[in-house]
Image: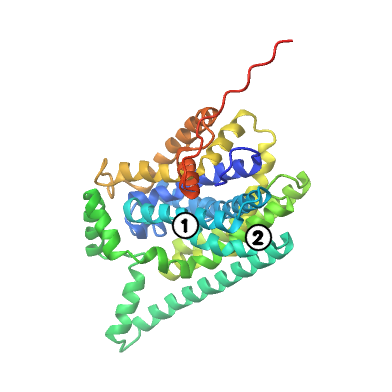
Amino acid sequence: MASTATDRIATLDLIRGVAVMGIFSVNVIAFAMIEGAYFNPGAYGGHSGLDLWLWALNLVLVDGKMRSLFSMLFGASMLLVIDRAEAAGQNAAAVHLRRMIVLMGFGLLHFYFIWFGDILFSYGAVGIIAFLFRNRSARQLAISGGGLLLVSTIMFTLFAFHMHSADLAAHAAGASAETIADWNGIGRLLYPLPSDFMHDLAVHRGGFFGRSEYMFTERGAEPFTSLLGIGPETLGLMLLGMAGLKSGFLTGAWSDTSYRHLAWIAVPVGAIAFALLAFVDVRSHFYSPLVFGGFLALVPFRTGMALGYAALIILAGRGMGPLAGRIEAAGRCAFTNYLGTSLVASFVFYGWGLGLYGSVSRYHAWLLAPVVWLAMLAWSKPWLERFQYGPLEWLWRSLSRGALQPMRKRPAPAPIAA
């Protein structure tokens, strides 16, 4: 989400374009059906045939990896904006703080009025902290980022064990009502009760204002409390992105051999880890501590896969031709495309639009994804041929600077006759 229209780094835009498209491949499920179905196809949406295969493929190849890429790219772009502000003699801290505060505002609007799965608020809040690391070397950033990811891995592993312990305690002889209630509260994350399902349907098939009231009254604190869980991982990924920029990894400066070696190791190792998780999930009949806690705890593997994907995208981009330009444009308009997908999906599934929420299978809901991908590729490049920024990129820039920014591109000067 870089904020400048000139001096673009093509590889950043290319990777970001792939990431924003890939994110919707998993997010669309969370728009279409009850939240627990995102991790547990047994909760709703189908857990056999094409529905099961789609869940497994998304888990192994996409889920968490594209968000990790997006987070890294955010850190890299953030550092670019800071460096360019300093080079221009501006107060980089003030520039950065205004951008992050405006982004947090966008995130809160997104969360309360459009979709519960917002990442913008956390990016803004964590991005403020990431500013403190801006002057560290690539090596120091990589070590700090890796340390934070290790902290996240430990946190999520302990949470998985807590879930399992709560299950054992609730099913032990003489378990107290409080112990049983504790497990039921955790278990309902992935195994919602019929009453949960009916309430969820009523909320999402109802009107716009009714759903917004639900988000304010029943889930109002989530953007803030969720930072405790996802904050360390998000900051770690941003720092890795800053390291990737400073080291030349994300700019395409490494040798093809280095990119290939990274991809050949990181992607298969990560895919095997997630394939084993998918196998265990199915064999355990989607046991909550494994499905939810296990996925969260695989931080090193999804981070490694994200880095491997970045290497593959950079290599592929060197011979992709016109398609690369389309994807780069989608990446330059990633902010608009990210929020735009939320508007499209909420219109298709929520009650204020077509109202298909809770009435389609996982596979049928996912069919919206390739349609949205084509739309991203179709509109982004022609738009940027006429304008300097995507629509929401322009709005973010204007609000951050407190003044409307130039939008249209200036025509090239006419050649001077000899």
- Of the pair 417 and 121, the residue shown nearer to us: 417
Tell me which residue sits at (39%, 59%) in the image: 40
Tell me how far mark 2 sits from mark 1, CA to CA: 18 Å
Q: Position of residue 356 (x, y in %)?
A: 28, 44
Q: Position of residue 314 (x, y in %)?
A: 67, 43
Residue 298 seen anywhere in this rendered image of the structure? no
Residue reaching furthest top?
Answer: 418
Q: Position of residue 163 (x, y in %)?
A: 42, 75
Residue assigned mark 1 = 101
369 up-or-down from 212: above or below: above
Residue assigned mark 2 = 134
Is the C terminus in the top left, top right, bottom left or bottom right quadrant? Answer: top right
Residue reaching furthest bottom?
Answer: 174
366 up-or-down from 133: above or below: above
Q: Is residue 202 left or right of residue 31?
A: left
Q: Earlier in the sequence, mark 2 or mark 1?
A: 1
Residue 189, image quadrant: bottom left
Q: Amino acid at mark 1?
A: Ile
Tell me which residue sits at (45%, 50%) in the image: 26
Q: Position of residue 212 (x, y in %)?
A: 27, 55
Callout 1 secondary element: helix
Residue 19 seen anywhere in this rendered image of the structure? yes
- Of the pair 318 and 103, the residue shown nearer to us: 103
162 up-or-down from 365: above or below: below
Tell me which residue sits at (48%, 45%) in the image: 335
Q: Give the crowd class for mark 1: few <14, some 14-19, many >=20 residues within 10 Å.
A: some
- Of the pair 230 and 104, the residue shown nearer to us: 104
Q: Give the crowd class for mark 2: few <14, some 14-19, many >=20 residues within 10 Å.
A: some
Residue 269, image quadrant: bottom right
